[in-house]
Amino acid sequence: MDGYLNQLIEFLTDTSARALDYISEPWFIYQVVIALALFALARFLGNRLEPKLESRARAIKGHPGLLRLVAATLRRSDWVIFIVLLFIAIAVLRSVTWPSRSWLLGILLWLAGTWVVVAILSRIIRNRLVARSVAWLVWIYAALVIVGIDERVALLLDNLALPLNEVRISALTVLKAAFLLTLSVWIATTIGNFVDERVQRSSELTPSIRVLIGKFAKFGLVLLAGIVALTAVGVDLTAFTVFSGAVGVGLGFGLQKVVSNFVSGVIILLDKSIKPGDTISLGDTFGWIRELRARFVSVVTRDGREYLIPNEDLITQQVINWSFSDELVRLDVPFGVSYDCDPHKVTELAINAAVSVARVDADRRPVCWITAFGDSSLDFVLRFWIRDPQQGLTNVRGKVLLALWDAFKENGVEIPYPHREIIMKGGAPRGVADGIPKD
């Protein structure tokens, strides 16, 4: 540790001495004044130019990626103008005086140019935190290279290490691993999303197989990216065998439900019991499957609520899949009519009323059966088929009942009220019969 401190003090002392030598030169002040004046001019011109270019950039349609890059460039128009002005100033100075008198402007030109390029290209990454982190790391490394102290800083970071048995973890290794992991995971995620989109467009694969291939592609690419990044920085993965085993046991108990839901999701995709677009019922939840995730299934109900049901529940509980083998669903509508009505005519009217509803399948003719001689009515059940259960069941039943009501009204078929007969045995109490209340 003392050796590292000595190296750090020596580095700071040497860097400070060089900086003092540069600052003491007269042309250093001249270059600082020129740079500040050019930056102020660039800010003025950028504020005037950006609104005019932004109105034209809004005309770009159908290319969201290009629009993001153009917007990022316009937001840094003052820096772009500053770079152009620096280039012109350096060219003029080198033509009238010694090149050494424009060295600071040259460094500023490289730093500003690198920052603009990195800031614009990092907009490709949609996660703003990751984009900013990558941009700063790349720019800091480029700045060290431009200034010419990258090797000395790398040596200092490499000496700042923590030995763990046979493994030596230095600050330089951690920084390299963090950068490579971030970059490789982002690349793997981007490729995984691209593969997933291509697979989802394939009409030759079933929806379950599409989801399964997409999930395994993303998971496998991210795992491969992590292994490649750690191997690239010289991390021996075999050294983590014992540590990973102990951690794995602890995570196994803590993430038991998570693993169970993940395995259940894989089973669901393999046996094709449910797939995106199916209409299911689970307990009191009735809706259509919007998405299959690694841990849960998204089910959207008719009232717009989105239920996130764990995959394990779909394996262990009874699930009604209204569209498992086909989309045909039979619905029953019970009703009753008066004993004065002709049951044959009632049956015919009920079938015609069901056929008149648009969502009732015309290929399977509805049927109507008398089911019982009730206490006050003839009881019937009307059965019909629909092909779109995801559009709702209550609404189609309601339309069929309205059609029944209209048909019965038009043809004089009565729907009776319940009849109740009250038989009073014995005479009424004295006083009540005479209309005189008792004391």
Image (cartoon, rainbow, N blue to C red):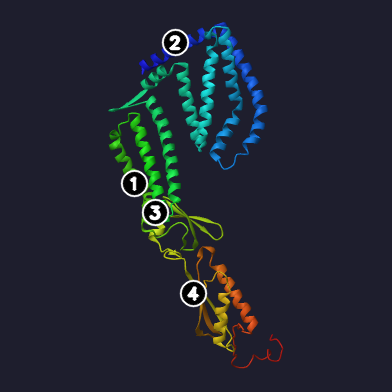
Quarter of the image where one finds residue 39: top right
The residue depicted at 56 percent of the width and 80 percent of the height is 350
Considering depth in this image, is 268 or 261 the residue closer to the camera?
A: 268
Residue marked by disc 2: 14
**The C terminus sits in image quarter:** bottom right
The label nearer to you, 3 versus 2, is 3
Disc 1 to disc 2, C-alpha distance: 53 Å
Q: Is residue 142 above or below residue 282?
A: above
In the rendered structure, the answer to whether residue 328 lies left or right of residue 47 reads left
Q: Position of residue 71 (x, y in %)?
A: 59, 34
Disc 3 to disc 4, C-alpha distance: 32 Å
Disc 3 to disc 2, C-alpha distance: 63 Å
**Callout 1 crowding tier (Cα within 10 Å): few <14, some 14–19, many ≥20:** few
Label 3 with label 4: CB-CB less than 8 Å? no
**Looking at numbered disc 3 in the image, what kind of residue is underneath it?**
Ile
- Residue 81 visible at all: yes
Label 1 with label 4: CB-CB less than 8 Å? no
Label 1 with label 2: CB-CB less than 8 Å? no
- Residue 376 visible at all: no
Residue marked by disc 3: 209
Disc 3 to disc 1, C-alpha distance: 28 Å
Instruction: Give the mark, 2 or 4, whose residue is nearer the N terminus.
Output: 2
The label nearer to you, 1 versus 2, is 2
Instruction: Give the mark, 3 or 1, whose residue is nearer the N terminus.
Output: 3
Residue marked by disc 4: 364
Considering depth in this image, is 15 or 389 the residue closer to the camera?
A: 389
**Looking at numbered disc 2 in the image, what kind of residue is underneath it?**
Asp
- The secondary element bearing badge 3 is classed as helix
Considering depth in this image, is 11 or 41 the residue closer to the camera?
A: 41
